[in-house]
């Protein structure tokens, strides 16, 4: 409509037929021009790296020697990017709470950290279609002396929950009625384990995969609760995070992911980290998850 009005206004002012023909072709070219590329494609076209952001979240995404991107979400994302023809990758390690702010501030281009797709996060960044479904759990002192299995136990027993800054478990606990002063936030898994072992917290909230890894690291000093004891609505789906401005790249990423997800090649790449066919997301879409989680 803008172009049509512009053409009519200029037509009334111009009397030269040749000028009108030239103007018509110019406006047609502008209307038919390609959509503007996002900042990630600008970087790629300039020969720069694709910067992937993640925290130290074993076995999801974590740094190895020289910040080598390890973990099944990193392995998966690198696999999709390779299918797209991109291998010029730069890892950027930060704390979990810095992932979304860092993405929005252009400190990296993609979040591979194993981030749950949540309605609150969908308001800030764009997610790929889900690459897996996962449950949460608690780590508790050996023997689970307070009998904590879910958020209602924490609420009813006036227990202290420790979890990571920016974790989905903060929202979940509040939704289940746990008082804010019964929720302690720390930077990440190492600090969560330390708080439970020291008795400063009665339970540590995190993903089930992370809890299993922490129990192993602790030499079985803590137990892991059954994830099925938590409400069904806490079952979550993980997506790869992008800036809203990079939806052109995200569309291509989703197309490549559709072919890669669940393939024998993909499953072989992630099996060393514990990801199996049981974690495949099925037919659930990001649009549904953003609305319902």
Image (cartoon, rainbow, N blue to C red):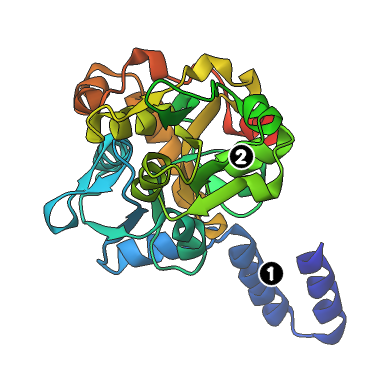
The answer to whether residue 60 is left or right of residue 205 is left
Q: Residue at x 31, y 23 (%)?
A: 275
Q: Percent x, y for residue 38?
A: 48, 61
Q: How crowded is the residue under tag 2: few (<14 C-alpha within 10 Å), some, or many (20+)?
A: many
Question: For residue 23, which quarter of the picture?
Answer: bottom right
In the rendered image, the quadrant that contains the N terminus is bottom right
Residue 167 is left or right of residue 155, and the answer is left
Q: x, y percentage for residue 60?
A: 33, 37
Task: Give the Cα distance between marks 2 and 1.
Answer: 47 Å
For disc 1, the marked residue is 24
Badge 1: how crowded within 10 Å, few (<14), some, or many (20+)? few
Residue 126 lies, in percent from the top left, at 55, 48
- The residue positioned 48% from the left and 23% from the top of the image is 145
Which numbered marker is on residue 118? 2
Q: From the viewer's perspective, tell me whether residue 175 is left or right of residue 254.
A: right
As helix, strand or loop, the secondary structure at mark 2 comes to loop
In-front residue for pair 73/7? 73
Q: Earlier in the sequence, mark 2 or mark 1?
A: 1
Q: Position of residue 113 (x, y in %)?
A: 38, 45
Q: Nearer the viewer, residue 115 or 49?
A: 115
């Amino acid at each position: 409509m803008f172009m049509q009005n512009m053409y009519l206004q200029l037509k009334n002012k111009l009397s030269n037929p040749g000028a009108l023909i030239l103007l018509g072709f110019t406006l047609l070219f502008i209307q038919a021009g390609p959509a503007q590329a996002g900042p990630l494609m600008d970087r790629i076209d300039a020969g720069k790296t694709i910067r992937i952001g993640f925290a130290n979240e074993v076995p999801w995404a974590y740094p190895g020697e020289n910040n080598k991107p390890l973990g099944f979400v990193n392995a998966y994302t690198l696999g999709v990017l390779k299918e797209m023809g991109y291998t010029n990758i730069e890892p950027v390690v930060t704390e979990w709470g810095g992932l979304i702010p860092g993405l929005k501030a252009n400190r990296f281009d993609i979040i591979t950290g194993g981030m749950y797709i949540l309605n609150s996060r969908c308001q800030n960044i764009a997610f790929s279609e889900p690459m897996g479904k996962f449950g949460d759990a608690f780590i508790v002192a050996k023997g689970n002396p307070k009998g904590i299995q879910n958020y209602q136990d924490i609420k009813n027993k006036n227990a202290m929950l420790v979890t990571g800054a920016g974790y989905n478990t903060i929202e979940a606990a509040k939704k289940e009625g746990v008082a804010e002063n019964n929720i302690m936030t720390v930077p990440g898994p190492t600090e969560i384990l330390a708080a439970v072992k020291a008795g400063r917290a009665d339970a540590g909230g995190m993903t089930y995969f992370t809890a299993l890894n922490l129990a192993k690291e602790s030499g079985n000093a803590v137990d892991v609760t059954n994830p099925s004891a938590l409400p069904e609505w806490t079952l979550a789906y993980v997506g790869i995070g992008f800036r809203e401005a990079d939806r052109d790249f995200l569309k291509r990423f989703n197309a490549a992911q559709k072919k890669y997800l669940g393939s024998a090649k993909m499953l072989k790449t992630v099996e060393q980290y514990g990801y199996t066919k049981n974690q495949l997301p099925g037919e659930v879409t990001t649009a549904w998850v953003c609305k319902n989680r």
